Image (tube, rainbow, N blue to C red):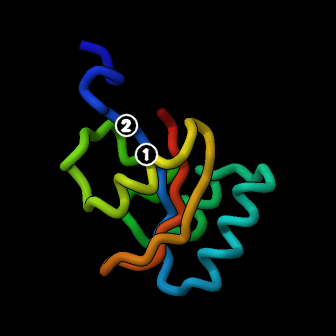
Amino acid sequence: MSAKDTGEMRAAHIVVDNEALAEVLLTKAKAGADFSLLARTHSKDPSGSDGGDLGPFKPGDLIPAFEQLVQSLAPGDVGGPLKTPRGFHVIKRIY
């Protein structure tokens, strides 16, 4: 079965504590800044050391709002900020 058949997705994210910083990072990422460098520099999530890469996940693995935002993005696109209990997420869909 392929990733498409199972609904598998892959994304990277940057998690910060305030929405203003998330908006700045989103703007930089959309302008072509290196997303993984932004994640390593700014993200408070442990995935930041891996450029924000969350690895592959299937529907139901993560919180619904996060998955819905990833699904709304085309591969390579960046979206957000998404507020969750962990902070504000800027998300890049890998596939």
Q: Amino acid at mark 2?
A: Met
The answer to whether residue 15 is left or right of residue 74 is left
Q: Position of residue 75 (x, y in %)?
A: 56, 36
In this rendering, the answer to whether 42 lies above or below 76 is below
Dot in front, 1 or 2 = 1
* Quarter of the figure with residue 59: top left
C-alpha separation, residue under disc 1 versus residue under disc 2: 8 Å
Residue at 38% x, 54% y: name it.
Answer: 68
Task: Examine the rendering and report whether any part of residue 16 can be seen.
Answer: yes
Q: Nearer the viewer, residue 13 or 76?
A: 76
Q: For the view shown, which residue lies furthest in the left direction? A: 60
Task: Measuring from the top left, give residue 37's x and y in whole percent.
Answer: 64, 54
Instruction: Return the residue at label 2.
Output: 9
Quarter of the image that includes the N terminus: top left
Q: Rate crowding at label 2 as few (under 14), some (14 to 19) or many (20 or more) other CA atoms within 10 Å.
A: many
* Residue 61: % across, % down: 20, 49
Mark positioned earlier in the residue sequence (1 or 2): 2
Please give the name of the residue rendered at 47% of the width and 33% of the height, measured from the top-left corner.
95
Tag 2 secondary structure: strand
Q: SS for tag 1?
A: helix
The residue at 51%/63% (across/down) is 14
Mark 1 residue type: Gln
Circle 1/circle 2 CB separation < 8 Å: yes
Bin the neighbour count of mark 1 within 10 Å (Cα to Cα): few under 14, some 14-19, many 20 and up: some
Q: Is residue 60 left or right of residue 55?
A: left
Q: Residue furthest right?
A: 31
Residue 7 falls in which quadrant of the image? top left
- Tell me the residue at 43%/45% (across/down): 71
Q: Which residue is mark 1?
A: 71
Residue 13 picture location, percent across and down: 48, 57
